[in-house]
Image (tube, rainbow, N blue to C red):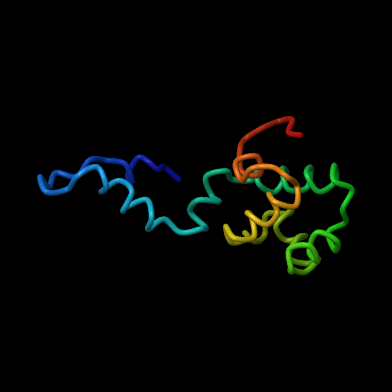
Amino acid sequence: MNFSRYFKKKNDSKVKNFSKLEIFEKVSDEELIEVSGRNFSSNLRQKRVIAGLTQKELGKLIYSSKQAVCNWEHGRREPSLELVQEMANVFKCSIDDLLKDSENIN
């Protein structure tokens, strides 16, 4: 996904700097998670294993199922940003740490 389309300046003279933010607010959870591609899946698994949690245990902590966690780790489904925030809280990291492209995260 290319975010440049969300940050192009509008030609309307009445539109102020807030136009970029207004457009960005319309971006869906799925579009934001797509930015990281498959990185979220591998980062989630790595964070979960480092934390010593099973998929079932993580699911219980964020009020979700083992199958949902499995689907996220395999890239078959994408969680809502609210769930990503819950996972970040569990792992004591930022949302960026879960979404970013990184070969070695802690």
Q: Is residue 65 left or right of residue 35?
A: right
The front one of 52 and 35 is 52
Q: Position of residue 33 (x, y in %)?
A: 55, 51
Q: Position of residue 39 (x, y in %)?
A: 65, 42
Residue at image point 50% right, 51% down = 32
Q: Where is 56 relative to 4, above or below?
A: below
- The residue lying furthest to the left in this view is 13
In this rendering, the count of numbered labels is 0
Q: Is residue 6 left or right of residue 84?
A: left
Q: Is residue 3 left or right of residue 70?
A: left
**Quadrant into which the C terminus falls:** top right
Q: Specify the quadrant of the image occupied by residue 17.
A: top left
Residue at image point 78% right, 44% down = 47
Q: Where is 68 relative to 32, above or below?
A: below
Residue at image point 27% right, 40% down = 8
Q: Is residue 45 left or right of residue 76?
A: right
Residue at image point 64% right, 55% down = 84
Q: Position of residue 64 (x, y in %)?
A: 74, 68
Q: Specify the quadrant of the image occupied by residue 69.
A: bottom right
